Amino acid sequence: MPQLIASILTILLFIPMLLLSCAYLILLERKVAAWVQDRIGPNRTNFSFGVLPFKGHHFGLGQALADGLKLLVKEDYTPPAVDRKLFLLAPIIVMIPALIGWAVIPWGGWYESEGFTLWSWLPFVGGVEVEPFRVSIAAAPVSIGVIYFLAVGSMAVYGVVLGGYASNNKYSFLGGLRATAQMLSYEIPMGLCVLIVILIMGTARADMIVHLQANHVWNIFYHPLLAVIFFTCILAECNRAPFDLAEAEQELVGGFHTEYGSMKWALFFLGEYLHMIAGAGFFTILFLGGWDLPFLREPMAGGIGWVILKVHVFLAKIALILFVMMWVRWTLPRLRFDQLMKLAWRSLIPLTLLVLLLSGALVFVRAPMWGHLAANAAALAAALWIGPMLPQGPPVNRRIGLAGSRFSPAKAQA
């Protein structure tokens, strides 16, 4: 019963917080874009919306609410040639995995009660003695936490594919096909990264993986190469630049959501930002020690003060990862689709397989944890040595001669 109450309170507290944070992540994205491009960004929109008496700039914090209201009151147009049922179902399918995946996230470790008397102030009921208990601050602290998270996150591709297929638009359909190939390809190295962490930690419980890192060394210091690969896979799974080939404006107009508008269009991007938050939380659990704060020895379970501190530490790490995701988007150019697939199948998958073999051997011989850092370095060195020897295929970026150009002049005809 105490765990059930804790799970219900966690759901009631964090689901609204996640939905509201998505709105302000859009504002943060626009501010990060402005910072990268040496602009100011949105800083004028207040909370009056032209009607209410709340004047002043308020640092542009009203921009997120104004964007939401704009999408809410826009005309909800459905093209006549679409598959109407699937067309309406696709945005919902994108949202559901992003919401239910958070069930296994351990927000603040364990809360431990010393026991207390309940309802002692009621005259006819009397006091009810509650025995000491320990509960996990998570909606569903199951023993297969990270595996559940990985399985649920992979279901988001169905919404993208259905949206592209049901739109009856060739650009949308091509965007859905690209999303399918991309997500299926990058789920392999992501799953291998999770498998390696489970192999080393000896458990699939998300809260236990965090606890094993707490007061010790985080996994990012033992497996930096694995952390970089996992972060790259998160970007690809969330359809974020430089892996946003499913919605490449230069080639596919708008990709899988070309025919969508109003709140149906907004649901796609709400799902994308929810997946970003979930991916950042997943990365924090596996590699950044979850709620662990460096140089502060924390108890395995504590009172409400420790829970609040751990929640804030966990959210701060998620915010840092989200900022890095946005920074990458506005820094790196978009890859070509063949480069995207080549990165997965020729680089990330062989690398993670090699690290898996090395990690399995180290766990078998019970080597110290620092041996895994040497395994990462050896795998990276092997990739840099063997990579140039592999067949590269036909050149796709060859220069084409142009008459009058001093950089690539056309060859004189014989």
Image (spheres, grey):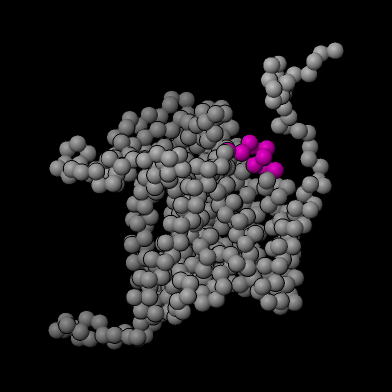
Residue 137 seen in this snapshot? no
Q: Quadrant of residue 203?
A: bottom right
Position of 307 with respect to 209 (left or right) is: left
Task: Indicate whether 405 appears above or below 151.
Answer: above
Quadrant of the drawing holding the C terminus = top right
Q: Position of residue 150 (x, y in %)?
A: 56, 57
Q: What residue lies at 73% left-to-right and 29% top-to-bottom? A: 398
Residue lying furthest front in this view?
Answer: 406
> Can you give x and y, in whole percent of width and height, for residue 56 in the image?
20, 43
Name the side, left or right, on which 230 lies relative to 32: right
Residue 338 is inside the magenta segment: yes
Q: Which of 59/160 is in front?
A: 59
Q: Quadrant of the N terminus?
A: bottom left
For the question of whether residue 310 can be seen, the reply is yes
Relative to 109, residue 160 above or below: above
- Which quadrant of the structure image shows residue 53? top left
Q: Give coordinates of residue 277: x percent, y percent.
A: 45, 54
Single out the residue that lies furthest toward the top: 414
Seen in the picture, residue 242 relative to 230 is either above or below; the reply is above
Q: Is residue 48 above or below residue 189?
A: above
Rendered residue at 46%/53% (across/down): 322
Magenta range: 334-342
Indicate the position of residue 280 as horizontal and vertical percent values: 49, 57
